[in-house]
Image (cartoon, rainbow, N blue to C red):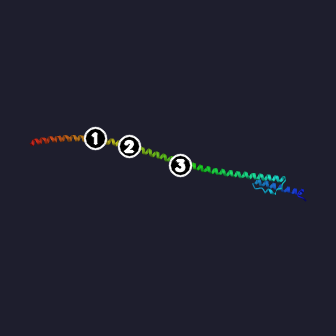
Amino acid sequence: MTATSPFVWLKDLCTHFDWLHAGSQALAEGRPLPPSDAVPDHAIGEIMRAFHRIDETLRARRDELDALRQAAETREGELASARGEAESARGNADAAMAALERIQEAIDDRQRGWDEMESKWLHDRLLMEQRIGDLDQRLRAITGRLKDHAHVLQTVAADLTSAAS
């Protein structure tokens, strides 16, 4: 028998159909196809090569999807990180606002204390000025009385001097 014998061709055809069936199952299960160089160069071989091209295309698409999935996971990680940083910044801003509120309260308390101290100081100053005024009047009154007493004593001394002479 020659290579073109119908029996050889039928045997090759059955082999190729078995290969085709196994290849379609492999594609369905996601397994690689057997190498295409085992397929003869005729119509069945062209079909097998088409299956190989489909398999290569599917693998390329799967690789692209994996790359996209990985990129999406990376972006999701970056977003989670940015979200964490934003939450941290929000927490820092809240803490800063709370600190500013405490500072403002302290300033307000200090201002109230200053205002109270100034008011007390002004009141004490007014009291001291009144006391100084009262003491000044008493001093003038005492000075006036002392002048009167000095005048009386001078008169008495003059009388005594004239009586003694």
Q: CA distance from mark 2 to mark 1?
A: 24 Å
Q: Which mark is residue 126?
A: none
Q: Nearer the viewer, residue 56 or 102?
A: 56
The kind of secondary structure element at disc 3 is helix
Q: CA distance from mark 3 to mark 2?
A: 38 Å
State left or right for residue 87 relative to residue 130. right
Most extreme residue toward the bottom is: 1
Residue wearing tag 1: 134
Q: Mark 2 or mark 1: which comes first in sequence? A: 2
Kindly identify the amino acid type of the residue bearing the numbered disc 2.
Glu
Q: Is label 2 in contact with label 1 (beta carbons under 8 Å)?
A: no
Q: Is label 3 in contact with label 1 (beta carbons under 8 Å)?
A: no
Position of 32 relative to 94 (above/below) = below
Q: Position of residue 158 (x, y in %)?
A: 13, 41
Residue at horizontal 77 percent and vertical 52 percent from the top:
53
Residue wearing tag 3: 92
Q: Count of labels shown?
A: 3
Position of 1 relative to 119 (above/below) = below
Crowd tier of the residue under label 2, counting other residues whose Cα lies within 10 Å: few below 14, some 14–19, many 20 or above: few
Residue at horizontal 49 percent and vertical 46 percent from the top:
100
Crowd tier of the residue under label 3, counting other residues whose Cα lies within 10 Å: few below 14, some 14–19, many 20 or above: few
State left or right for residue 2 relative to residue 34. right
Q: Position of residue 3 (x, y in %)?
A: 88, 58
Q: Mark 3 or mark 2: which comes first in sequence? A: 3
Kindly identify the amino acid type of the residue bearing the numbered disc 1.
Asp
Residue wearing tag 2: 118
Residue at horizontal 42 percent and vertical 45 percent from the top:
110
Q: CA distance from mark 3 to mark 1?
A: 61 Å
The kind of secondary structure element at disc 2 is helix
The kind of secondary structure element at disc 1 is helix
